[in-house]
Image (tube, rainbow, N blue to C red):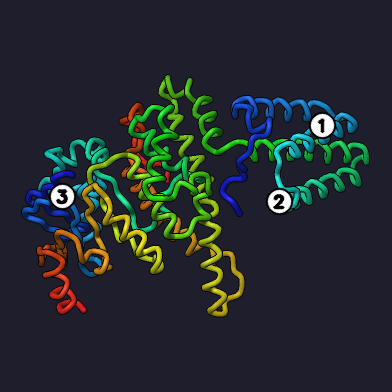
């Protein structure tokens, strides 16, 4: 499990600004859900696969990372085809695949920091009138990216410790120590963020890091 | 380098005194703080940059009251935590270094250069685009230090910087620490790390019980607490 799927590169998709890519992805998704012709969906899926190929990703890595989501899409496609209509099932499957692959291609070619800047820009009008703090929202999203893999590692360590003591898999026995760990870490992370001068100079007096963690 | 001054400082937690420092001035370049677990080492460090505030008394850095102007103090005083995993908050190394720089208002155009310089100073420029959670413990500790160095503090506080590191990474951190131009105040159990420091304080039960050079203090410390 990785915190971010971004790969460095110089493909055309890498060079497009993050805001344009994300806006295009939104429009692409809306258009896909406004249509239900399987031929159009097939074309859209082909375009998405073309975009993915242009990123220069190692096909084996793409296969590994997309297999899980594709199984879910295949299940939805089969269920719709069997329970409603085969052509509709095909359209659903191709639509989801097109969107999934396009989103994956954008994620591969956009650094987290660039995405966070877009988020900050999006929320900046609300920030200016004092409704939200765009810097806080961006930091919160970043913390999610950063700490999901840390939590997965911690869950593995707890599971191994339990297995070493002969305990069977038990979700509750895993969750309780994991939550305790999260709460302990949250205090340290908040202190570390404070120690690094947060909040930004222009956003002073907007609370402190403890509100995030 | 900064001058850190404690004046009649008392920290109380849950009704009992956890640290009491009547009068203390820290102005040497390398200062060690030793003591058993729970002796107050981390609390003392946290007082210096306002992560913990005194229940009474005053802590100043270059005359700036930490309780009144924590932001001004944190521009002068960086902090390296025991677990670098909790200190690195962005998924990519260069992005994490830029987090602190943005907080102190470094212009966007200067961020890549300042980031590259900080990484180069520690010889870890090859880590710039690596994912933080895939780094080794030693690499994470160096990235955390680079992130603090990038903010150009005059003093850096280290809370057990070598705990959990293997011998090679411990030596690496030690070499970096000794080569710093900035003032370093280090809370640690690793006495080899601090044997060539300028000064060593030993805490016991929240009070300073030894204040000497490491050469003189380490032997007494080991004899008393081993």
| Residue A101 position within the rendered picture, expressed as x and y whole percent measured from the top left | 74, 39
Tell if the residue under mark 3 belongs to the same chain as the one under mark 2: no
Instruction: Look at the image and tell me in which quarter the N terminus of chain B lies.
Output: top left
Could you say which is closer to the camera, residue B29 or residue B59?
B29
Could you say which is closer to the camera, residue B62 or residue A97?
B62
Pointer 1 residue = A44
Disc 3 to disc 2, how far (Cα)?
A: 55 Å
Residue count near mark 1 (Cα–Cα under 10 Å), binned few <14, some 14–19, many ≥20: many
Pointer 3 residue = B55
Instruction: Look at the image and tell me in which quarter the C terminus of chain B lies.
Output: bottom left
Disc 2 to disc 1, how far (Cα)?
A: 22 Å
Q: Chain of mark 3?
A: B
Disc 1 to disc 3, how far (Cα)?
A: 64 Å
Residue drawn at 70 percent across, 44 percent down: A57
| Residue B69 position within the rendered picture, expressed as x and y whole percent measured from the top left | 20, 36
Q: Are marks 3 and 2 in contact (CB under 8 Å)?
A: no
Residue count near mark 2 (Cα–Cα under 10 Å), binned few <14, some 14–19, many ≥20: few
Whether residue A210 appears in this view of the structure is no
Pointer 2 residue = A61
> Regarding mark 1 in the picture, which secondary structure is present there?
helix
């Amino acid at each position: 499990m990785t915190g971010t799927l971004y790969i460095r590169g110089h493909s055309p998709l890498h060079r497009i600004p993050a805001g344009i890519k994300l806006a295009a992805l939104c429009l692409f998704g809306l258009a896909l859900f406004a249509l239900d012709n399987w031929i159009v969906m097939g074309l859209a899926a082909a375009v998405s696969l073309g975009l993915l190929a242009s990123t220069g990703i190692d096909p084996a890595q793409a296969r590994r990372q997309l297999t899980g989501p594709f199984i879910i899409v295949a299940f939805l496609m089969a269920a719709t085809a069997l329970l409603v209509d085969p052509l509709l099932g095909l359209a659903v499957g191709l639509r989801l695949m097109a969107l999934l692959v396009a989103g994956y291609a954008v994620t591969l070619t956009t650094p987290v920091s660039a995405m966070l800047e877009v988020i900050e820009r999006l929320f900046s009008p609300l920030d200016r009138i004092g409704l939200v703090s765009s810097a806080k929202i961006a930091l919160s999203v970043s913390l999610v990216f950063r700490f999901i893999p840390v939590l997965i590692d911690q869950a593995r360590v707890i599971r191994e410790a339990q297995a070493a003591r002969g305990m069977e898999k038990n979700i509750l026995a895993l969750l309780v120590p994991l939550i305790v760990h999260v709460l302990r870490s949250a205090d340290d992370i908040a202190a570390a963020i404070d120690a690094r001068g947060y909040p930004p100079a222009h956003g002073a007096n907007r609370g402190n890091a403890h509100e995030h963690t | 380098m900064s001058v850190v001054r404690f004046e009649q400082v008392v920290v109380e937690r849950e009704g009992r005194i956890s640290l009491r420092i009547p009068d203390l001035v820290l102005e040497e370049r390398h200062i060690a703080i030793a003591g058993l677990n729970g002796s107050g080492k981390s609390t003392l460090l946290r007082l210096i940059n306002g992560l913990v505030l005194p229940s009474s008394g005053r802590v100043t850095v270059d005359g700036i009251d930490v309780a009144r102007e924590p932001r001004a103090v944190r521009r002068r005083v960086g902090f390296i935590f025991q677990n670098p995993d909790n200190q690195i908050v962005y998924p990519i190394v260069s992005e994490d270094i830029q987090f602190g720089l943005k907080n102190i208002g470094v212009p966007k155009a200067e961020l890549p250069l300042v980031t590259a310089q900080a990484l180069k100073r520690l010889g870890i420029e090859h880590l710039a685009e690596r994912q933080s959670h895939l780094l080794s413990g030693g690499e994470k500790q160096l990235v955390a230090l680079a992130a603090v160095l990038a903010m150009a503090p005059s003093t850096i506080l280290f809370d057990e910087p070598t705990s959990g590191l293997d011998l090679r990474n411990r030596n690496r951190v030690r070499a970096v620490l000794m080569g710093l131009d900035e003032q370093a105040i280090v809370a640690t159990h690793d006495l080899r790390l601090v044997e060539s420091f300028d000064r060593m304080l030993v805490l016991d039960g929240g009070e300073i019980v030894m204040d000497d050079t490491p050469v003189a203090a380490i032997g007494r410390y080991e004899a008393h607490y081993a």
